[in-house]
Image (tube, rainbow, N blue to C red):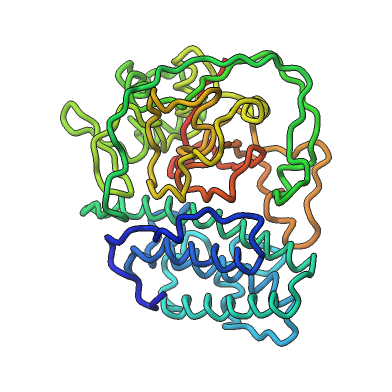
Amino acid sequence: MRDVMKQPGRDLLKPEERAAISPEQPLAQRFDAVRAMTRALAEPLTAEDCQVQSMPDASPVKWHLAHTTWFFETFVLERFDPAHRPFDPAFRELFNSYYQGVGPQHPRPRRGLVTRPTLQAVLRYRREVDAKVLALLAQDPAQAERDALIELGLQHEQQHQELILTDVKHLLSCNPLLPTYRDGWPLVTVSPAPAQWIGFAGGLVKIGHDGTGFAFDNEMPRHDALLAPFELADRLVTNAEYLEFIRDDGYRRAELWLSLGWDAVQAEGWQAPLYWQRDGDCWRVFTLHGLVDVDPWTPVCHLSLFEADAYARWAGARLPTEREWEHAVQTCAAPLHDANLLESGALHPLPLARESRPGGLAQAFGDVWEWTSSSYDPYPGFKAAAGAIGEYNGKFMCSQYVLRGGSCATPASHIRATYRNFFPPAARWQFSGLRLAR
């Protein structure tokens, strides 16, 4: 990768980059592949694109490139490489996100003001740290504690790959020129698939990760959960269905909204999902491919928890709990390899065609993160890891809600049925949508 980013317009992923990264690959090979994917996501951008921060919740791409490198330097090289010397001592604070156990952090809302180090310097930082980590793996290919931290770093980087795309989308939407991140529109005309309900008997079920393979600490321990009988819609809610909610004055009917949600509607002036704009009698939406007409059969996305909950109430249904979602997906979800995830290159939710509809739950993985009605709480018996690594998930178990299933920007090797994503209920810039329950 050259120090200067290429101009927008190239294909996002080369054919060899589209292959899903597999847990069966040797750790060094996966390390190289994940790090290369992050660079590939940044390549369509200019240096100016990589510098700017569009809102406090988003971060500049340059910061993502540096912070994911900081993770490996701080938690791997400082601990396991006796000869390591910091690339730049100032980076310890500058690119620390929220690890109080490591030290102070540069304020998150002001990351876009960090014009130095330059993008070229950050890319050199990545290359140096990559070389040192790969040298460690070559010297001793099996060291359990070190390898577990490298694995955590790779999973952490895959989270930031999705954040790069969501943050860039928000950034480009703020530009009056409405530039594209990637040329080429992925949608084709489909025969729509009417939603159907799938019933589940409930009872005592197992929830959480069983400890086989990688999982974040918040997915464990595996435990029993008691479910009443319930039903889930077999597909995601579409733009056409959400448009009916809008046309029925959904954003002007206080009785449909949670109190804090109604406050947000009034304060923010919400009238439609994020990135939608009215064009006469039609609606258009900004995407990573530019401004396009709202496609009726595509899953609706960029909804807050408040909007998803209001729509479900309007539709005479509700949001699923995360336990219902996980049990249902473990029982009858379509295969993960058929999902619209990052490797598909679509970078946008895709409509579900009637003729290609699988049995069971469709679109359970990919397309959009699905809001649940579950607050982000610890599982029974949860215990955060010792030290700064323990700050990764546990300390955010307050005032957040759980989303499940991944999105069109989620790497395939990063998602699983037990994965618990979480955001504040007003967050809209992620690829977030909903599936109905009753």
Q: Is residue 127 above or below residue 322?
A: below
> Whole-percent x and y of residue 28?
64, 69
* Quadrant occupied by the N terminus: bottom left
Outermost left residue = 280
- Residue 350 image-quadrant placement: top left
> Whole-percent x and y of residue 239?
35, 27
Residue sitting at 54 percent across and 32 percent down?
A: 364
Q: Nearer the viewer, residue 122 or 114?
A: 122
> Whole-percent x and y of residue 101?
72, 65
> Whole-percent x and y of residue 91?
57, 76
Q: Nearer the viewer, residue 115 or 325?
A: 325
Residue sitting at 54 percent across and 64 percent down?
A: 33
Q: Nearer the viewer, residue 361 or 115?
A: 361
* Quadrant occupied by the C terminus: top right
- Residue 119 image-quadrant placement: bottom left
Viewed as shown, does residue 188 lie left or right of 309?
left
Residue sitting at 51 percent across and 30 percent down?
A: 260
Q: Is residue 194 above or below residue 150?
A: above
Residue sitting at 60 percent across and 72 percent down?
A: 93
Viewed as shown, does residue 224 lie left or right of 172?
right
Viewed as shown, does residue 178 lie left or right of 413?
left
